Every structure is written in C-alpha cells, then in structure tokens.
Amino acid sequence: MSPIKIVQESFRFALQALFGNKLRAFLSLLGVSIGVFAIISVFALVDSLERNIRNSLDSLGENVVFVMKWPWASGQDYPWWKYYQRPLPQLKELSILESRLELAEAITFVARASEKTAKYEENDVQGVGISAVSHAYQDVYDFDLSRGRYFTTLESNTGKPVAMIGANIAEKLFESDNPLGKHIKFMGQRAVVVGVFSKVGDHLIGNSDDDNIVIPVQFARSFMRLNSETSKPLFSVKAKLGITNDQLKEDLVRVMRSIRRLPPKADDNFALNETSMLSEGVDGLFRVIDLAGLVIGGFSLLVGGFGIANIMFVSVKERTTIIGIQKSLGARNRFILIQFLFEAIVLSVIGGFFGLFLVYLGTLIANASLDFELILSLKNILLGFFVSVFIGLVSGAIPAYSAARLDPVEAIRSGQ
C-alpha cells in the first residue's frame, strides 16, 4: 500500500475511534488538550511579558549608563547602610560632567515625582508622573511625539512653564480637543502644553510616557525637591558611537571621583547602572517560569498520553479481526505499526489543536479586558503541534507494536 493510502486509512480509523465512542474519546483527549493548554498558555504569557520588559529596557537605551545613588544589583551581602550614606546626584554636577566627560555623546539630569494629579478646566487625571529633565533629554532617550515639539534651548535654560504630556493624559484631559497651547495644572503650577508623546502602552519596567508629564528642570526647581530621595535624581549618560558601556563607565568613574574629591583609596560614593544588569535578572526569572510551565504541563500531558494509549489498546482489541485479515492478505508488520502510530498521532493532534484553540480564546479575552497585549506566536503554535505529535507517538508506540506482532490466524480466530 502506498504511503498516501496508509495515511488515508489511518485517518479514517482515527475518526472512527473518535466518533465511535465520543465520551471515551473526549475524556481521553481532554488530558492532551489541558496539557497543551497549560504549556502553551504559560509560554505565551512568558513571551508576552518578556517582550514587554525587553521593550521597556530598550526604551532606557542599551548604550546608556545611569549615575545614581543606589546600585541595581543586589544580593545577600547588599550593604544598604553603606549606600544610604551616599550623596544624591545633584543638578550642579551636570555642567561639570558635560565639560569633562570625553566619551559621552549626551548627558541629562532627571528627577521624578509620582502619583500626582493633573487638571484642565473641569477634567483631571490622577496617578501622573512628573519628570524634570535637562535639555539633552531628547538626545539620550528615544521617543516620538504625535503632536507638537520638544522644548527649545531657551525654554529649558530659562525654566519656562512648558510641558510635554503623555497620550493617556491628553486623552483624559482634552478628549478630542487639541491640547497644544492649552494650560494644565499640576503640583500647584500652570504649564503650557507644547508636545504630546505617541502612545507606547504600559511598561512593566521603567516609566511609560503615556502617563508622564515632562518639564524643564529649571522650571521644576521652584516647586520640586530635586535633591531628595523621593525624586530619585540621576544622570543618564549616552555613549558616543563605537564606545562601549565599560569604556564609558571608566570615564564616568574618573570624572565623578574628581567632582566629589574622593581620595585614591576611598570607595566610589555613586553607582553606575545599565540595562544589562536588569536583563540578566530577567533571563534567570523567565528560565524558572519556563521550567515551571513545563512541569505543570508535563503532568497533564502524561495523563493525556495514558488516555491516548487507552484508546489505542481498545482500538487494537476491537479491530483484531481486521488486523488478522489484513495480515493474511499480505500486509506487513510495518504497515500495521505505521497505521496505528499515525492513528494515535491524529488523535493526539486533535486534542492539541483544541488546547491551542483554548489558548487563542484566552488571548482574545485577555487583550479585550486588560491593557496588556498577549500574543500566541507561530513559535508556540508549532511547539504545541510538535508536542501533540510527540505525545501521540509515545503513547501509541506500545499498542501499535502489539498490533503489528499479532499472529494473523490467532487474530482472526479471537475475533470470531
């Protein structure tokens, strides 16, 4: 029999096994469906979370070093009491850094205030972040404006009351009106809107510009405490083209130690952080989550595999006479083996596709109800398919082998 004929016959027998006893087939395939659903849903969630976090880290910049009081790295020997005594980055250090750094393309001072309220006429929005930045902010961070412009040098240097607002703030305060040129209120101040950030969505790490107001730091000096722990001041330093972060950090250590007049043997009283430090932690976290998903889904697939094996053993018993007739007409053991193996794979793949369909429905529901994008990628779809094929192959191996080893005479006699 040709391979195409074998596939056709095996598919027909698989459908007979599926519809011949619907309840038995449903309960048996349910294990495969749940297993595939568990594994692929975990992987889809992890991939979506990882993509969001990677995008958040990318928005911070791979070639950017952050000069801060506290280091991002932590561990059992984290000497917090030592870091607590460090001075905060100060705005007055900015001009010295700009003049002395040799490997930096741009440097900006950033201080933030969180959970504030912004108002326009009768409308208000809560939970807003305020970022006070020096003029080079646009040279360090990548962002797009859907409307308006960035601050002029004069506005930044003289502290003009101007602001760029996030897409969510613009939507809630102004609805369909054009926000440019209008005055908003926050922290007891009035500022003119000169720009609106393009919508980027929520970030799990870092601050999304959707709910952020960016103002010149010279404007913020009159009402924000720029040198306090609550404002978390920092310098963001972008390396020149072709300069690595390690080279930039060496340059920063040299200049920062001279600014703060540290003796040669004294420890640094500042931290140099970069996104790679967060990326390493993210990689370890997602490896653990992936392993947990495999373990959880593995147990479900094990149950599903036993269900497929049960169907196949029953199918072999019910078709013992047919097997005997096929062998008496010249069918080889290989044909019988392939026939039952393919039948087991078809049953398992049907269960797997049902599990993938449940994952797809879950992503639609999650995307409709949450402000977070879940994606069922082609990689995970193919993974679910190959997992189903593997379970069908393994669970159908023993029943197929037992069917192939049947003696034709005994098979025909046992069916009478």
Image (cartoon, grey):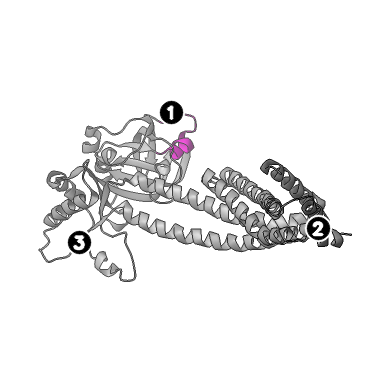
The residues colored magenta run 166-179
Residues at discs 3 and 1 in contact (Cβ within 8 Å): no
Residue 204 horizontal side relative to residue 91, left or right: right
Residues at discs 3 and 2 in contact (Cβ within 8 Å): no
Name which residue lies at 50% across and 53% down.
46
Q: Nearer the viewer, mark 3 or mark 2?
A: 2
Query: Amino acid under label 3?
Result: Asn
Q: Earlier in the sequence, mark 3 or mark 1?
A: 1
Query: Amino acid under label 1?
Result: Asn
Q: Nearer the viewer, mark 2 or mark 1?
A: 2
Q: Earlier in the sequence, mark 2 or mark 1?
A: 1
Residue 150 horizontal side relative to residue 282, left or right: left
**Dot label at residue 178:** 1
Q: Residues within 10 Å of mark 2 (few under 14, many from 20)?
A: many
Residues at discs 2 and 1 in contact (Cβ within 8 Å): no
- Locate residue 397, reporting x and y percent: 66, 59
Name which residue lies at 33% across and 46% down.
60
